[in-house]
Amino acid sequence: MDGILFLAHRIPYPPDRGDKIRSWHMLKHLGGLARVHLACFADDEADAAHLPALREAMAGSLGEAHVEVRRTGRLKAGLQALVSGEPLSLPLFDSPAFRAFVNPLLASGSVGTVFAFSSQMAQFVPRGAKPRFVMDFVDMDSAKFAGYAEEARAPFSWVYRREAAKLFAFERATAARADVSLFVSESEAGLFRSKAVLPAADIRAIQNGVDLDFYDPAAEFPKLESMGGPLIAFTGQMDYLPNIEAVTTFARDVLPLIRRQRPDARFAIVGRSPTEGVQRLEQGENVVVTGAVSDIRTWLAAADVVVAPLRVARGVQNKVLEAMAMARPVVASPAAFEGIEAEPGRDLIVAKGTRAQADAVLGLLDPQVAEAMGRSARAQMERAYRWETRLAPLTDILAEPGRAAA
């Protein structure tokens, strides 16, 4: 098989946040099929410094690599987008140096497939390029911005509506020229199909998996000492808007209802980069904001209940899969449950609204109920969510002829 060029908006290593988890497993799987060249951005110098560890983890299957720290700020990108009429996401992730690495590789004839991870990376795949073009949108990002617009006030609501419209037009044009377009769930793929109306486009779903050897309650990892009462945990990147909104609402509205019956209950907000607003939620022992932790399993294993009360969510929530793999009972909002293959009431609880979420958490503070649901959750992950099972269709996709060869 000819070489593969993998384009990503963030270096796919280490797999310690949602997008990196999927991109890393995609990259590693592709490396088992052919030699892979990598072009990606990094958030900062520390992020870029992970390239040697990534190369080692690829066990010799990684070829040429370009990792570039993204320098363009939102203000500059926003002005460029206003002038050009394109979505903000494109100039925010554009770079002459990036193109100078990608274009000669594509012209060399050594690349048989371009795999672009996240919509903004499609701008680096020229129209009419000879290699097969596989576009992994992951989520329908334009729908995410539309959701933000509904929640925000002016002028941000206008900014989000513009981004939703401009980005959808770009997503649609990209899917029209890609050989295959991928989404993280069938519900996400179905939403895009219904809005884009592209009968000739090949739009499929490849779901995320979970590392069941790592996220295993029987594995070796540091344990947390008891905090003296029931522990309710939320995990995630804490400078991400939907996560911020979720923990703020839970701490303000749901936790007080729980504490009326269980005054010893505590809420832990676990994840890197908490904003000032998230940090202000900390209330002595009642609400704990951890910031970055060395091993997320420590907190998952200690939690009596894991919550995912997101109002706005796209695709599949890795935080839910990881908690279920750790045999923890989960209370998820309908948005956080979207796209997950599990049976509500057996494998997890799906609850909408303040009162329903509080009641669900209180019900799971019964140890026998919690243990039974945790066992069921783990069993469902083992049945359906191993990465090798989830990514098997990717092997078939790369074996198919591209449009030009078909």
Image (spheres, helix red, strand yellow):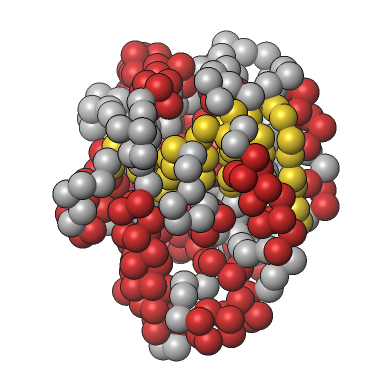
Relative side of 356 to 100, left or right? left
Q: Residue at x 17, y 49 (%)?
A: 199
Quadrant assignment, res 96: bottom right
Identify which residue, 317 or 178, lies in the foreground. 178
Identify which residue, 90 or 111, lies in the foreground. 111
Q: Residue at x 51, y 55 (%)?
A: 126
Residue 4, placed above or below residue 90: above
Residue 290 at x, y percent in the picture: 68, 47
Residue 38 at x, y percent in the picture: 66, 39
The C terminus is located in which quarter?
A: top left
Residue 193 at x, y percent in the picture: 21, 51
Q: Residue at x 38, y 56 (%)?
A: 174
Relative side of 352 to 289, left or right? left
Residue farthest top in this picture: 218
Identify which residue, 134 or 109, lies in the foreground. 109
Quadrant assignment, res 377: top left
Relative side of 382 to 115, left or right? left
Identify which residue, 64 or 88, lies in the foreground. 64
Residue 216, placed above or below residue 404: above
How many numbered markers are drawn?
0
Q: Residue at x 35, y 51 (%)?
A: 177
Residue 330 at x, y percent in the picture: 39, 34
Q: Is residue 368 visible?
A: no
